[in-house]
Amino acid sequence: MTTGRVEDLLRELAPQVLAVLVRRYGDFAAAEDAVQEALLAGHQHWVDGPPEHPFGWLVQTASRRFVDHRRSEASRRDREHRFQRGQPPAYDVVDRDDSLTLLFLSCHPALTPPSAIALTLRAVGGLTTAEIARAFLVPEPTMGQRISRAKQSIRAAGGRFEPLTGAEQEQRLPLVLHVLYLVFNEGYAATGGGDLHRVDLSAEAIRLGRMLHRGLPDDSEVASLLALMLLLDARRPARTDDAGRLVPLGEQDRTRWNHELIAEGGTLLDGAMGTGRVGEYRIQAAIAALHDRAERAEETDWPQIHALYGLLEVLTDNPVVTLNRAVALAMADGPSAGLALVDEVAERLPDHPRLLVVRAHLLEQDGDRESARRLFRRAADLATSRPERDRLLMLAARHDA
């Protein structure tokens, strides 16, 4: 078994092992730490492949680590006898998958989105603190503190490891979807560093999205978010050239897109249509599908995309959505129409890099090359992603005298 397949297996088993320990010992924070140590041990010992019962091996290893930690705590010596009784079985027989319970617990309302993201990736995704820190370009101690505070916040808020009621699940589901969406976006278009993509993050968001969809197959927004992630991720092979430079959507070689993912995403979206409420992920997925189904950029249905952005704008009141609508309007009715809409939203996004880039592109299409050059350079100065900055500087250089 390759290293990649071992890592996939460890991440798949991580939430199930954590569920066993939390049910057995009742301490989410300590159990999560023990499972992380067991996963590290698995990375070290499974070089030649996993044991016959990998789930049982992880449960036993994590249980021993949990017991060892408890034994070392002088203030809890009175509990030692209870933990010393008997050896953990080779593996527990689990008649349910508690991964969804863990996902909803990790996205507790008491947490900020960054804390929920970190805890979700560690507890449910099985990533180490070091891996999460590298993905978000922060020092490992900083990420460790963030995860620790997240667990403390859940404990202080009375978070319970048990299936949520229907009302609780409905209340928390938007945050769960938002966390997965943020994880995917950071993987699909990294906000910092030298790489455009962080494939491990986008892949993990899709894996967790599939898990959530299996648990909630009739929820149209869950299906729509998974469809959106698949439809966007399908373009990843064509988003950079051989030198790693960013290739915009209209210039991409669409034969390099992953058409299996496009088909899967389209099927999910079609199944969600006409069911449940129309939410933001369904609209975004419909926009992504219109792009993906156009065999050539010139065949893109921009009027329909403009109409969908109008619906999304009403639903979210997000000025960035208005900017995206301005691009679609410019493609449908010309750059002057798009620029007028950019002017309307400019006060809500002063000096926002996205506004500068959109205005620059539309001015360039309208023939104002000098203004476009200045705006491209200003946007490049604000860019935190090197591929994005390089692309903007290249666009500005096209108009140098």
Image (spheres, grey):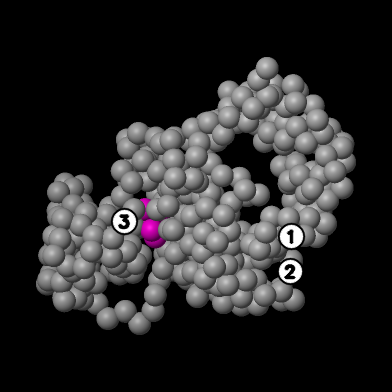
The percent position of residue 363, horizontal first and vertical second, equals 78, 31
Mark 2 / mark 3, whichever is N-terminal = 3
Segment colored magenta: 121-125
* Image quadrant where residue 55 sits: bottom left
Q: Amino acid at mark 1?
A: Glu
Q: Secondary structure at mark 2?
A: loop
* Image quadrant where residue 82 sits: bottom left
Tell me the distance, in whole angstroms, between the alpha carbons under discs 1 and 2.
30 Å
Q: Amino acid at mark 3?
A: Glu
Does residue 392 appear anywhere in the picture?
yes
Mark 3 / mark 1, whichever is N-terminal = 3
Please tell me which residue is depicted at 78% across the width and 55% down the height of the picture.
Answer: 302
The percent position of residue 396, horizontal first and vertical second, equals 64, 26
Closer to the camera in the image, 157 or 76: 157
The N terminus lies in which quarter of the figure?
Answer: bottom left
Please tell me which residue is depicted at 63% across the width and 31% down the height of the picture.
Answer: 395
Closer to the camera in the image, 72 or 279: 279
Q: Which mark is residue 32?
A: 3
Please tell me which residue is depicted at 50% across the width and 36% down the height of the picture.
Answer: 387
Q: Secondary structure at mark 3?
A: helix
In front: mark 1 or mark 2?
Answer: 1
| Residue that badge 2 annotates | 277
The percent position of residue 335, horizontal first and vertical second, equals 83, 39
Q: Which mark is residue 299?
A: 1
Q: Secondary structure at mark 1?
A: helix
Based on the picture, tell me whether residue 178 belongs to the magenta stretch. Answer: no
Tell me the distance, in whole angstroms, between the alpha carbons under discs 3 and 1.
50 Å
In front: mark 2 or mark 3?
Answer: 2
Q: Amino acid at mark 2?
A: Arg
Please tell me which residue is depicted at 45% across the width and 41% down the height of the picture.
Answer: 244
Discs 2, 3 touching: Cβ within 8 Å: no
